């Protein structure tokens, strides 16, 4: 089974913060972006998406 992941890159005052989430719930992804940008003052600078096989 393939699982989709998203890696977000945020920047604030030269500090880069990365966050990886499983992309099964877009609400979780939007909450991460909202909290980082609106609450913590970071700027979303890019993101990467990829699929990976799950191993049991």
Image: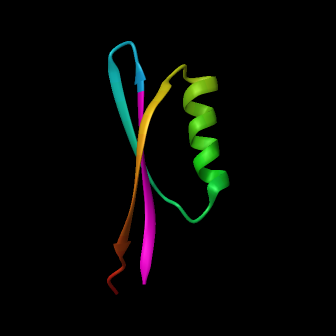
Q: Report the side of 41 relative to 6 (left or right).
A: right
Q: Exactly how many numbered labels are in the figure?
A: 0
Where is residue 28? Give x, y as percent.
62, 52
Where is residue 43? Give x, y as percent.
49, 24
Q: Residue at coordinates 57% horizontally, 41% vertically from top-left? A: 32
Q: Nearer the viewer, residue 55 or 45?
A: 45
Furthest residue toward top: 13
Q: Classify residue 1 by image quadrant.
A: bottom left
- Based on the picture, tell me whether residue 6 belongs to the magenta stretch: yes
Q: Nearer the viewer, residue 40 or 30?
A: 30
Q: Residue at coordinates 33% horizontally, 15% vertically from top-left? A: 14
Q: Relative to residue 6, is residue 56 depicted above or below?
A: below
Residue bounds of the magenta highlight: 1-10
Where is residue 40? Give x, y as percent.
55, 23
- Based on the picture, tell me whether residue 23 belongs to the magenta stretch: no
Q: Residue at coordinates 42% horizontally, 36% vertically from top-left? A: 46
Furthest residue toward right: 27
Q: Relative to residue 36, is residue 50 depicted above or below?
A: below
Colour pattern of the rendering: rainbow
**Quadrant where the C terminus lies?**
bottom left
Q: Relative to residue 18, is residue 50 depicted above or below?
A: below
Secondary structure mostly seen in magenta is strand
Q: Classify residue 26 by image quadrant.
A: bottom right
Q: Relative to residue 53, is residue 28 depicted above or below?
A: above
Q: Residue at coordinates 44% horizontally, 72% vertically from top-left? A: 3
């Amino acid at each position: 089974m393939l699982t989709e992941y998203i890696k977000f890159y945020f920047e604030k005052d030269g500090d880069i913060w990365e966050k990886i989430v499983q992309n099964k719930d877009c609400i979780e992804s939007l909450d991460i972006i909202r909290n980082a940008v609106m609450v913590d003052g970071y700027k979303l600078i890019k993101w990467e998406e990829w699929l990976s096989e799950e191993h049991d």
